[in-house]
Amino acid sequence: MTGLRDILERHVSGGSLPGAVALVARGDEVEVAVVGSADTEGSAPMVRDSLFRVASITKIVTAVAVMMLVEDGRFALIDPVAPWLPELASPVVVRTPSSPVDDVVPAEHAITVADLLTFRAGWGFPSDFSLPAVGLLFSELKQGPPNPQLIAAPDEWMATLAKIPLLHQPGEAWLYHTCSDVLGVLIARVAGCSLPEFLAERIFEPLGMADTGFAVPHGSRGRFTGCYRTGPQGGPELIDAPDGQWSGVPAFPSGAGGLVSSLDDLYAFTRMLLDGGGPLLSADSVQRMTTDWLTPAQRAGAELFLEGQGWGFGGSVDVAPVDPWNVPGRYGWVGGTGTAAHVTPSTGAVSILLTQLELSSPTPPALMREFWTYAAS
């Protein structure tokens, strides 16, 4: 019978990626596989506590932080965000998604915390990246694959965002990515400290996530893997080395994709969600996070990213068994650097996959799908 290690070894031995680390937990039974090397040179073997850029798995952590502030009574889900993000007090919307960026109308209602959590505030990536208002997210905000040292500090970033029109009216459509970066700024302003400080004090320290943060200390870089993309000859091509962009805390700590973490740190985090939120959140908050908030039309409009899935707070929610790995209620997300983390409350399962190979498109690659099918079996 094919095991978890067999799945990873097949892809690593084929030369498509240097190494991988994975975990599948079914109840209290935990299976871990560690395969390959931390880099293409084979200078260091992959180890269980290797460090990875987890990219968009960061979005789930950011959503947890927002829900902690809700439970603290700092704001409610229905509250407008303008008191803390005054740059967003009077947003405008392009008349149609394909309209020029100067053909705008006023937003019909204020942007709320819930709009940001459900990715329906009006900024973000649709299926068509060529739309004029979307182009500004790349050229002005540097949205896209994580490049932490290239992004402006939060106040400057927010001032730039405020000049970019919404693609849709708030609440109307699901758009990927940008809302989590806005939430990161919201958390910092409401809490009165930086996003790294808040996450460290309120999430990482209570859960024992000692290897998770926005930068890798010098003493830990021996465990930090290289980050690669598929090169023109089909093999891995280095994007970022261990002494690269994660060597220091960036000016803009991205709530959408900036974290580095390890297998066991992510397991502690996902177990918290699976076990009902303690000690960080109430079971009610976790239930809200893992509920699909999208309409059928919104799910259909997000097909490039969601493939029919729904969206909770910070992560997708499987709504129908359309694939062997698609279990209704499964919640989690993938990172563009080749990572994935999910929990399935109905079966008590956790699945975590960490690789070093950047995804070439929003469509999950074969390894990820094989891993998910195995985790669901």
Image (cartoon, helix red, strand yellow):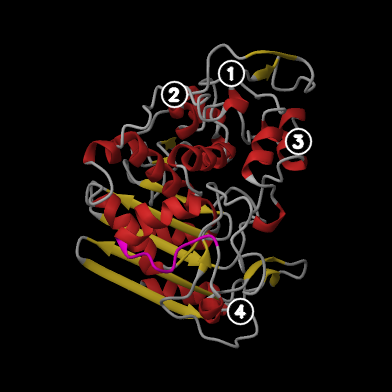
| Residue nearest the observer in this picture, 359 or 251 | 251
Foreground tag (2 vs 4): 4
Determine the secondary structure under disc 2: loop
Q: Is-magenta flag for residue 86?
A: no
Q: Quadrant of residue 315?
A: top left
In the rendering, at what x and y percent does residue 127 appear? 64, 35
Question: With respect to residue 200, does 3 lie above or below?
Answer: below
Q: Residue at x 62, y 50 (%)?
A: 252
Q: Is residue 187 visible?
A: yes
Q: Amino acid at mark 4?
A: Asp
Q: Amino acid at mark 2?
A: Thr
Query: What number is the disc on residue 39?
Result: 4
Measured in 3D between alpha carbons, the distance from the residue under mark 2 to the one under mark 4, in whole angstroms, is 43 Å
Question: With respect to residue 190, does 23 lie above or below?
Answer: below
- Labels 1 & 2 near each other (Cβ < 8 A): no
According to the picture, the residue beneath numbered tag 3 turns out to be: 135
Determine the secondary structure under disc 3: helix
Q: Amino acid at mark 3?
A: Gly
Dominant SS of magenta comes to loop
Q: Amino acid at mark 1?
A: Gln
Sequence order check, earlier mark of 3 and 4: 4
Q: Which residues fall within the magenta stretch?
A: 207-214
Determine the secondary structure under disc 1: loop
Sequence order check, earlier mark of 1 and 2: 1
According to the picture, the residue beneath numbered tag 1 turns out to be: 169
